[in-house]
Amino acid sequence: MQKQTFKSFLRSFTPYQIIYLAAVVTLTAVLVIFFPADVLGEYQSIALIVCAIVSTISNPLCELLISKQSKWNFVVDFFLIEIPELVICLHFGWYAVAATVVFFWMPIDVISYLRWNKHPDTEDENLTVVKRLKPWQTALVVGGIVVFGLVVGKLLQLIPGASDTYLDAFASAVGMANGILLLLRYSEQWLAWLITTVLYLFMDISSEMYILLVTEIAMLVNTIYGIVKWWLYTKRVAVRDKVAENTVDKAITK
């Protein structure tokens, strides 16, 4: 990224986005400093605590970058979310999610960054062009999630030490759907992410990792923001493309 482009990227953050990130960091710091036993539960290993704190702060940052249609969300996700999450998942026996991190999320972050880099918005270099699914495509995605969740959940029951097998499997299935839709720049990825966030919220509560609730609540807020922001963008682009198409048609007929 060139120096001028990086400055442009920093200037693209709105007051809401800056306040949002500041609130997440502040709340995390307050909980860790004043209520360490409550937010970190009985798991006091240094590695797990560091992973939980890094993930708590980085998840909302990554999702905010997605709502901004920024390709840099994939860099944050790879280094500051997937690696800490892998450590946490292995500790709690969430093997489906752990496998998803290694064999799906990490590779897809690299591929997604490269693909998004090829589709910048023509009017704003900080934006990536996004689009919507057709109804039949949505039906296929939902069907795939259901089949994957049921099959993998059944298989996980055969692994000693595995916990929350079907919850684990469906969290992985919806998360993978979110990753693929995000790679392809479809706005429906927000709905998949909304479901994923809710599932992870229940998993964090069951594991007493209360510090991660900061992440989940912050991401629920930003998910609504992202849904609205991407919907407005796709609507605006559709109008822009229609005007351009009409202009070309008129030029041809003259």
Image: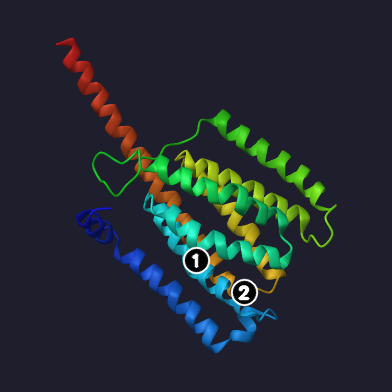
Residue 65 is situated, as x and y percent measured from the top left of the image, at 40, 56
Q: Callout 1: few (<14), some (14-19), or many (20+) C-alpha neighbours within 10 Å?
A: many
Compared to residue 192, the image places residue 95 above or below, namely below
Q: Secondary structure at mark 2?
A: helix
Q: Which label was assigned to residue 218?
A: 1
The quadrant of the rendering that contains the C terminus is: top left
Query: Residue sitting at 23 percent across and 56 percent down?
Result: 8
Compared to residue 122, the image places residue 243 above or below, namely above
In the displayed orientation, state which residue is furthest to the left. Answer: 254
Residue 174 is situated, as x and y percent measured from the top left of the image, at 62, 47
Query: Residue sitting at 67 percent across and 52 percent down?
Result: 99
Query: Residue sitting at 64 percent across and 73 percent down?
Result: 209
Pointer 2 residue: 48
Separation of residues labelled 1 and 2 (CA atoms):
21 Å
Q: Is residue 166 left or right of residue 181?
A: right
Tell me the amino acid under the disc marked 1: Ala
Residue 122 is situated, as x and y percent measured from the top left of the image, at 25, 38
Q: Is residue 82 visible to us here?
A: yes
Tell me the amino acid under the disc marked 2: Leu
Q: Secondary structure at mark 1?
A: helix
